Image: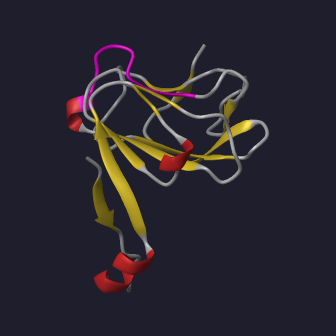
Amino acid sequence: MAQKTHIARKGQDADFAALTYRATVTTKAASYTVTAEESGTVFVATAADIVFTLPSTAAGLRYQFVLAAAGLSSGTGLSVSPAAADKIMGNGFTSADNKDAINTGATDREGDCIEVVGDGADGWYIIDVIGTWAREA
């Protein structure tokens, strides 16, 4: 079941934020394929080595993936995987089709996150990142 949270910008009251800035937050303890209908969702990884598979790019689709303490890994780490014909671009990556963004177990920390937005043509742009993320080799 998805949890909902409200985020207020500095100087706004909580009631205003509840009406205008609403994000769905959901936890996942296993690999998961994200749907277009879930655009705007914050996914929290609560188990190690989860792979979130993105839908094919569409302009404006947006997702955030966050690592919880329970998701810390000594292995592969949290991965965000695009569709085969899509790229994940930004954060210094050399973009290429079908290459994951990986928050490796060697460097992951609670609260590491990545947010992507679809461009509708080439794939996904990284618009926010915390932690060390690398492109799949």
Q: Is residue 71 left or right of residue 96?
A: left
Q: Is residue 11 above or below residue 121?
A: below
Task: Count all numbered tags in the image, as a single digit.
Answer: 0
Residue 30 rendering spot, x and y as whole percentages: 31, 25
Dividing the image into 4 quarters, which one contains the C terminus? Answer: top right
Residue 94 rendering spot, x and y as whole percentages: 71, 27
The residue at the point 48 percent across, 48 percent down is: 38
Q: Is residue 133 left or right of residue 108?
A: right
Dividing the picture into quarters, in which one does residue 136 lie?
Answer: top right
The residue at the point 70 percent across, 36 percent down is: 123
State whether residue 14 appears in this view. Answer: yes
The residue at the point 28 percent across, 21 percent down is: 73
Q: Does 75 lie within the magenta span? A: yes
Question: Which residue is outermost to the right?
Answer: 121
What colour scheme was applied to this rendering of the protein? secondary structure
User: What stretch of residues is rendered in magenta?
Assistant: 71-81
Task: Depth check: give the residue in front, 56 or 64.
Answer: 56
Task: Depth check: give the residue in front, 41 or 100.
Answer: 41
Dividing the picture into quarters, in which one does residue 104 lie?
Answer: top left
Question: Which residue is outermost to the left?
Answer: 70
State whether residue 13 appears in this view. Answer: no
Q: Is residue 122 left or right of residue 83?
A: right
Q: Does 77 lie within the magenta span? A: yes
Q: Is residue 14 above or below residue 36?
A: below
Residue 9 rendering spot, x and y as whole percentages: 41, 76
